[in-house]
Amino acid sequence: MSAVAKLVSVGDTPRPVYELTGVSRFFNDGKVVALDGVSLTLPKGEFHSVIGSSGCGKTTLLKIMAGLMPPSRGSVMLGGTPVLGPRDDIGMMFQHATLFPWRTTAENILLPIEVRHGRKAARAERGRAERLLQLVGLGGFEDAFPSELSGGMAQRAAICRMLISDPQVLLLDEPFSALDEITRDFMNLELQRVCMEREASAFLITHSISEAVILSDVVHVMSSRPGRVVQSVRIDLPRPRTLEMTSLPEFGAYATTIRNLLDKGAFL
Amino acid sequence: MTDQAQMPADAAAMTDTVWVQKVSWSARVPRWVSMTVLMALFLATWHLVSISGLVSPLILPTLSDTVSDLGFVGRNLLSGGYMLSAFWVTTKEVLVGFAIAVTIGVTLGILVGETTFGERAVMPYIVAIDTMPKIAFAPLFVSWLGFGIGSKVALAAFISVFPIVVGTAAGLHAADANGRMLFQSIRASRLQTLIMLKIPSGLPQFFTGLKIASISVVGGAVAGELLGGGQGFGELIRAAASQLDTPRVFSLIIYLSLLGVLMFGLVTWMQHKFVFWDRSSTTKPVQS
C-alpha cells in the first residue's frame, strides 16, 4: 500500500536535480571530519539553502557538489549522472564577483564560452551577453571595465557570467555577503526573479537566517565539526517572495526554528 | 523641543564654527618648487665647498668645471665624436644584455612559477646563485668571452636576470583562489589558465621585476667595462679617473644615468600600456 502511494507521489513531485547520499569528506588522513554523511535531494526548480556557522563545512559541501573536490565517501548525482569533475550544466557564484580587471564586462561574462568553445564562439554569443546584462539592469555597461562598476553591479555581472552557459543548477557560495544590506536585499529578490524565470534549481550557502528563509523552499541547517545536516526545514511561504513577508508571523516562526536548531548544533 | 530647533530666532543666535586647519608650509608649496629649491641648495653647497679650498679639486671638482665639462662631453656626443661611439657600445651591451635577461628570466620564471619541479628543485638554486655577489663573476666572463662586448653583455644579463625570474614566478602565483576556482569550474585547461588568468594577473609583479632589471642591467654593463676594459663608457670613466680628471668622471656618470632613465622609462611606459587596469604599481600616485 505504501509502495503504491510512493509510486504515485513520485509522479507529482518534481524530478530531482541533485541527489547526495552519505557524502563525507575527511582532511588530514581522516583526522578532521569536515562533512559527515550528508544526504539531501534538490528537486528541479526548487531553491534550497544551507545555513550554518563558519567552519561547518558548507563550502566543502558546495565544492563537492560542483565537482571541484571529490568526496571521501558517498555519492553525488546530478541529473541522473554522477558528478566526477566540473561540469557545464553547473553554474557557480562566489562571495566575490571575481571579474577580471583586464576584460570588459561583456568579455568577463563570455569567459566560460571562450574557455569552452573558443574566442569565435564567444564573439557570436555577444548578443546574449547584452540581453543578460539588460535582464539584471546593467544594459549599456557591456564595454565598461570592472573598475567602473560598484560592488552590487559587479555581482550582477557575475550572475550574468553564471547564466551565460544556461546551467540547470546554480551553486551560490554566499554570493552577496560582501554587499551592504540594502543592496543585498535587492540582489536576493533579483536572484529569485532570475531563478523563477528560468525555472532553475539553486543551492545557496549563507549564514544569514533571514536571507535563507526569504529565498528558500527548503533550508538545510548544518552543525559543525563534524558537518552534518541537523534538519531540513521546508518554508511554506507563497512565491514570489517579497521583503514585506519578513514581518509576517510565519517568517518569524521559521527564523526562530532555524535559530534554535543552529544553537543546538553549535553547542552540542 | 523639535519646534524650538526649527525656529528662525535660533538661527540668528548661531555662530559659525569655521576654523582653519593647520597645513605645513611644505605641503602648500607646489612639488616642482620644492624640487627646484632642494637642487639649488645642493648646487650652492657644492659650489661653496669647492671654492672654499677645503677640499682638493681632485676629490671634488668645482661646479663650474663640471658644468663646462658637461658641455664639452655633450658637444662631443652630439657631433658624433669618439664619446658617441663609446655611448653606442654601452647602449648595445645594455640592450642585448636586457633582451637576453628577459628571455632567460621569463623562461625560468615560468618554469619555477608554473611547475612543481621548478618550484621545488630549480628555485632553491636560483636563490642560492642570487645571493652570490654577481660582480665577482666579471673576471670569469672576461676569461670565457674575452675583452670584447660579449663579457659585458654576459655580466649585464647575469645581474639583471634574477629580478625577472623572481617577478615572473611571483606573478604566476598572484592569481587569487577565487579566480583559480572559477577557471577550474569552467573546465579551463592548464594552458588556458596560464594564458587567460595567471599571466594577466601576474603582470604587475612581472613589471616590478622588469623595472629593477632595467636599472641593474646598466650597472652590470658598466661594471663589466670597468673590470674588463673594452670601448664603452665605463672605459672612458676608468681612463678619466686614472688621469685624475674628476670633472670628466662626473659628467660621464651624469650622461650614463640618462641610459638608466631611458631604460626605466621604457619599461614604465610598457607597463602603463599593458597593465592599464592596474595603476597601483606604476610610478603615478594612486587616485583615491
Image: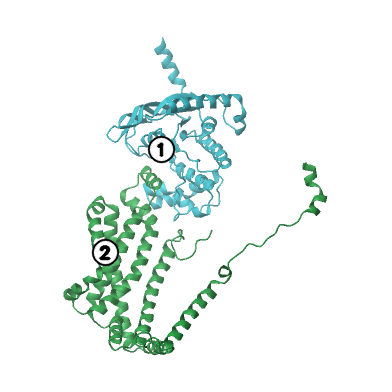
Tag 2, which chain?
Answer: B
The quadrant in which residue A78 appears is top left
Identify the residue at horizontal 48%, vertical 83% (top origin).
B44
The three-letter amino acid code for the residue at tag 1 is: Ile
Identify the element where label 1 is drawn: strand
Which quadrant, please, contains the C terminus of chain B?
Answer: bottom right
Q: Is B169 situated above or below B1?
A: below
Q: Are marks 2 and 1 on the same chain?
A: no
Tag 1, which chain?
Answer: A
The percent coordinates of residue A13 (x first, y second) are 46, 22
The three-letter amino acid code for the residue at tag 2 is: Ile
Identify the residue at horizontal 24%, vertical 56% (top origin).
B124
The percent coordinates of residue A47 (x first, y second) are 48, 31
Q: Residue furthest top?
A: A1
User: Which chain appears green?
Assistant: B
Name the residue carrying label 2. Answer: B104
Foreground pick, A3 / A211: A211
The quadrant in which residue B245 appears is bottom left
Foreground pick, A79 / A28: A28
- Please tell me the colour of chain A: cyan
Name the residue carrying label 1. Answer: A90
Identify the residue at horizontal 80%, vertical 43% (top origin).
B3
Q: Is A143 situated above or below B182?
A: below
